[in-house]
Amino acid sequence: MRKVIVQKFGGTSVSDTDKIKNVAKIVIKEKENGNDVVVVVSAMGHTTDYLVKMAKELSPMPSGREMDMLLSTGEGVSIALLAMAIQAQGYEAVSFNAMQVGIITENVHSKARIINIKTDKLRQNLKEGKIIVVAGFQGVTEDGEITTLGRGGSDTSAVALAAALNAERCDIYTDVEGVYTTDPRVVPNASRLESISYEEMLELAHAGANVLHPRSVETAKQFHVPLRVRSSFKLDNLGTLILGVDKMEIYRPVAGVAADLSQTRIVVCDVPDKPGVAAKIFSKLAKEHISVDMIIQSYARKISNTNDIAFTIDTNDLPKTVTALEELKSEIGATGDIQVDENIAKVSIVGAGMIDRPGIASTMFETLADLNINIRMISTSEIKISCLVDKDQAERAVKALHKVFELESDEVADVKGDLPNV
Ligand code: ASP
Ligand code: MG
C-alpha cells in the first residue's frame, strides 16, 4: 500500500505567490517519491492577525461564532491558491475546507477540539492520484457550525489528519530550521535539537516555545505520529524529529528553556479556608473553557481563617475570567479583591533527563538569584520547573539559564524576525 505523508505549511511559507510556488514544488517532490500527499496550510502571512484587528476595531468582544466565521476565511484563500499552483505545475490537486472533509469538532468557538475526521473523501481522492490540500485551523460541528482550533491550530489539523489517515509521518514546514533549545531570536546561539520527545516538546510548547501548537504534540503523542519540524526554505536540513521518549537516548538534564509572555496572574484574596472553595473556582473556570496553568494556594491565616488562591491564565481569557470570578465571589464568601497582574512572564526549563537528578531546581533558583530576579510563583512537574518573574526580566532569565545548563551551540542560528509559522 502507498504511504501517506501529511505536510503542513505555516503562514510565512505561503505569504506570497512565489512562496506558494515553492511550496507546490516541495509537495510535488513528495508525490514523486511515490507517496500519497495530504497538505495542510495556514492562512497567508499575517492574514489572521489582520482579521483579528478588524474585528476588534468593530467590537471589543466580538461573538465567538462570528469570529470563527471570519478567521476561517484566511485558510480558504491559501488552500485554493496552493491547489492552483500545484495544478499549474502539471499535477492533479484538489482543495477542501474542513466542512468538505468532515473535520468534526466539539461545539466551542475559538478553541474547539477535533472529535473525529471523516476519511472517505480523502481516501477516494488519494486513490484517484490527487494531491489533497486541506484548510488548517478550522473545523465544523455536527450541526454544521464553523469552528476554529485556536491560534496556531493548523499544526493540530495536520497531526489529526495524519492520525486519521494512519500516515507514515507528519512534516511541519515552517520558517525555522527545527526546534531549538530556546528561542533563537532571544539567544542567537541556541542549538537545534536533532530529536526531542513528545513529553519534552509538550512542556516546551506549553511553556511558550512558539514552534508548535501544544495540542498538535498531544495528538501526535496519543496516536504515535512521528512529527518532523523543518524549514520550507532550507530543504537540506532535516530539522527536528519528535518521537516517543522510549525511542530516545537522554543525555542532558535540560533540553530547553522557554518563556511565556502571554500569561496573567490572578489572585483571589481572602477566601474561606474550607472544603470546596477551590473546586468551585476551578470548575467555574473549566465550564467557561478557561485553562489554568500554575496554581498556588497560600498557607491559611489563623486569625481570619482565610487564604489566597493564585493562578495564571492566558491573557486572552482575562475578561472572561474576571467576569466569572466576580460572579462567584459572594457564593464562595471571598472577602478580598481579585487582583490581576499582566506584568508577568513564566520562565521554564524542560528536560526528561531531570528526573532523578537532584540539584536542577536549585541551579535554576541560584541563577535567578544571582541576577537579582525575584521569583513570584514556582511550579514543577516531573520534567519541568517554571518560575513566574516580572515580564521585563524574562529575557535576562532565559539567557542566563540557557548558559548555565550548557545549551549553547558554536553557531549562530539563522532566523528571520517573524514568529514561527503563525
Ligand atoms: N492562521 C491561524 C493563525 O494564524 C492558524 C495557524 O496559522 O496555524 O493562528
Ligand atoms: Mg502556526
Image (cartoon, rainbow, N blue to C red):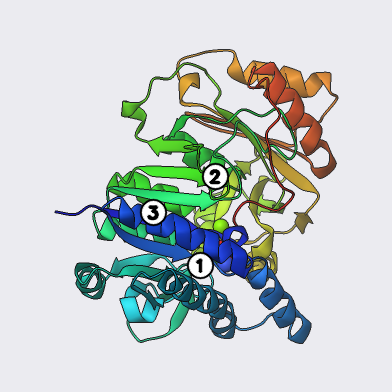
Residue 375 visible here: yes
Q: What element carries label 3?
A: helix
Q: Which residue is drawn at 64% across and 49% down?
A: 311
Residue that numbered label 3 is attached to: 29
- Figure quadrant, ligand 2: bottom right
Q: In which quarter of the image is residue 285?
A: bottom right
* Residue 280 in view here: no
Distance in Å between CA atoms under marks 3 and 1: 34 Å
Mark closer to the chain start, 2 or 3: 3
Residue 137 in picture, x, y percent from top left: 49, 68
Q: Nearer the viewer, mark 2 or mark 1?
A: 2
Residue sitting at x 32%, y 54%: 32
Amino acid type indicated by mark 2: Ala
* Residue position marked by numbered label 2 in the rendering: 205
- Around disc 3, counting alpha carbons within 10 Å, would you say few (fewer than 14), some (14 to 19), or many (20 or more)? few
The Cα–Cα distance between marks 2 and 1, rounded to whole angstroms, is 16 Å
Three-letter code for the amino acid on which mark 1 is drawn: Lys
Q: What residue sits right under mark 1 in the picture?
A: 111
